[in-house]
Amino acid sequence: MRGEEEILHALIEQNQKFSTDEPEIAANIGQQMLHMDLPLLSRDARSRIRDIAARVTPENVVLVGGGIGHLAAWLLDAWAAADSKRPSSFRIIEEGGKFGVILDRLIRRYSAESWTSVLSRPWNEVVAETTAWNAASATPENSIISPIPLPSPTGMVIIDVPEVQRPASLQLAFEIVKRDGIIMVIEPEVPTGDVGDFEPGNPLTEAQKRVEAFNSWISAIRESQMRGFKSAFVELSGATLVVFIGC
């Protein structure tokens, strides 16, 4: 039997089945994002996340931070391939519903309505309701009225949110991913330069928020180790992808 390190290395390497060229629909969305001045993941990061998701294809996948569907298009394109296996469910979390119509149109383009949906709610609320539902369903005398937000078990969580939100989003993912599940997230950049003094009562500057977020990121990494996750840091062009796998 292969060791954990060997399994993790095989998981994160480039998937030769797929090209690194951007799928047509994703390329069009990328152009829209440039016009809207929205931040993009590097192509290396998008293709590697796609490679891993397509290689493993857990039963239930969650994308936290759907935006206008750029990364979702890469994933749906891979799962739509004739010889590919798709997950049973794909939930896209995009708080506020601002891009809901765009995401719904993307889902229809891939004829994925039966297994893909958008949740226009905060990630922390989705996790809280899912964990509460799971706890209640374990008690036979409890009657479950509302449907579970995320199908269980959650096999993969992909996090694509702004830097300052990533540590908290990662810690929430630990709460719901199954024991041998996978989490993928881009590592925040290490803060550099003088960010000024942290003064009690005064709002933080953007630079200070990044410092706080990076400190929270370090805490999240420690928490992953305490929870028994193995992690791999994948150096890519323009980003470092961190992959956590439960053991």
Image (spheres, rainbow, N blue to C red):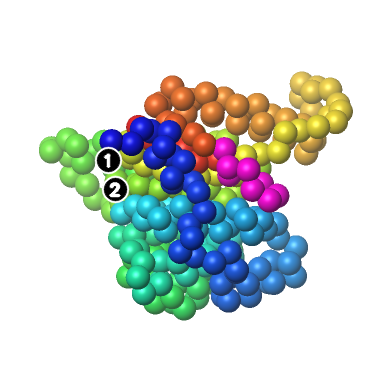
Residue found at x 50% / y 73%: 106
Tell me which segment is drawn in magenta. 233-241
- Amino acid under label 1? Asn
- Amino acid under label 2? Ser
Q: Is residue 129 visible?
A: yes
Q: Position of residue 24 (x, y in %)?
A: 58, 76
Q: Position of residue 143 (x, y in %)?
A: 18, 44
Q: In the figure, 240 relative to 196: above or below?
A: below
Is 137 placed left or right of 202 in the picture?
left
Q: In the figure, 36 relative to 229: above or below?
A: below
Residue under circle 2? 152
Residue 236 is inside the magenta segment: yes
Residue under circle 1? 134
Task: Find the residue positioned furthest to the front.
Answer: 1
Disc on the earlier residue, 2 or 1: 1
- State the SS at label 2: loop
Is 244 placed left or right of 189 in the picture?
left
Task: Quadrant for residue 21, please give it.
Answer: bottom right
Q: Position of residue 244 (x, y in %)?
A: 46, 38
Name the magenta segment's main secondary structure: strand
Residue 92 is inside the magenta segment: no
Residue found at x 64% / y 59%: 43
Is 175 placed left or right of 238 in the picture?
left
Query: Along the line of sight, which residue is nearer the eye, 234 or 194?
Result: 234
What whole-number distance in Å separates the C-alpha atoms at marks 2 and 1? 8 Å
Q: Quadrant of the C terminus?
A: top left
- State the SS at label 1: helix
Q: In the figure, 173 relative to 98: above or below?
A: above
Residue found at x 30% / y 60%: 88
Neighbour class for label 1 at 10 Å: few (<14), some, many (≥20)? some
